[in-house]
Amino acid sequence: MTTYKGIVNGKERVTHALPEEKTLNRIKEKLKSEEGKRTYGIRKQTVERSFADIKHHRGLRSFSLRGIDKVRTEFNLTCTASNLVRINNMIYKSPSW
C-alpha cells in the first residue's frame, strides 16, 4: 500500500492507495500520450466493431438464459459463431485483385 501525504484546505492529510491504483494511474498517463491515443483509436475500431457486429448481425441484444454461468455460455457460443464466420470469410473470400 502506498501512502501519500499532503495539505488540503490547510489541513494535513494522509491517504493510502492500493497497488492497483498505481497501475491504473500509469495506464491513464499512457493513454494521454500521443501513442496511447493512437493505440486506443485503433482499439475502438477493432474491438468495438466486434461487439457491434454481434449485437446487430447476430441479434444478441439481450440474453435468453438467466444466471451468470448460462449467460457466459451463451455469450461464448455467440462469440465462437462470430469467429467461425470471420474465419470462413477469410478463407473463402475471393481476392479483390
Image (spheres, rainbow, N blue to C red):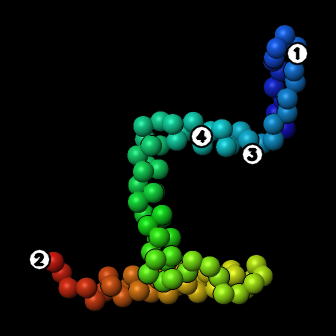
How crowded is the residue under tag 4: few (<14 C-alpha within 10 Å), some, or many (20+)? few
Residue 16 percent coordinates (x, y): 85, 33
Q: Which residue is mark 2?
A: 97
C-alpha gap between disc 2 and disc 4: 43 Å
As measured in the structure, the alpha-carbon distance from the residue carrying label 4 to the one carrying label 1 is: 27 Å
- The disc placed on residue 28 is 4
Alpha-carbon span between mark 2 and mark 3: 50 Å
Residue drawn at (25%, 85%) of the image? 93
Q: Amino acid at mark 2?
A: Trp
Between marks 1 and 3, how big is the CA–CA gap? 24 Å
Image location (x, y in percent) of residue 89: 33, 85
4 vs 3, front mark: 4
Whichever of callouts 2 and 1 sits on the residue coming sooner in the sequence is 1
Quadrant housing residue 3: top right
**Tag 4 near tag 3, CB within 8 Å:** no
Residue 83 visible from this viewpoint: no
**In the image, farthest residue toward the top:** 10
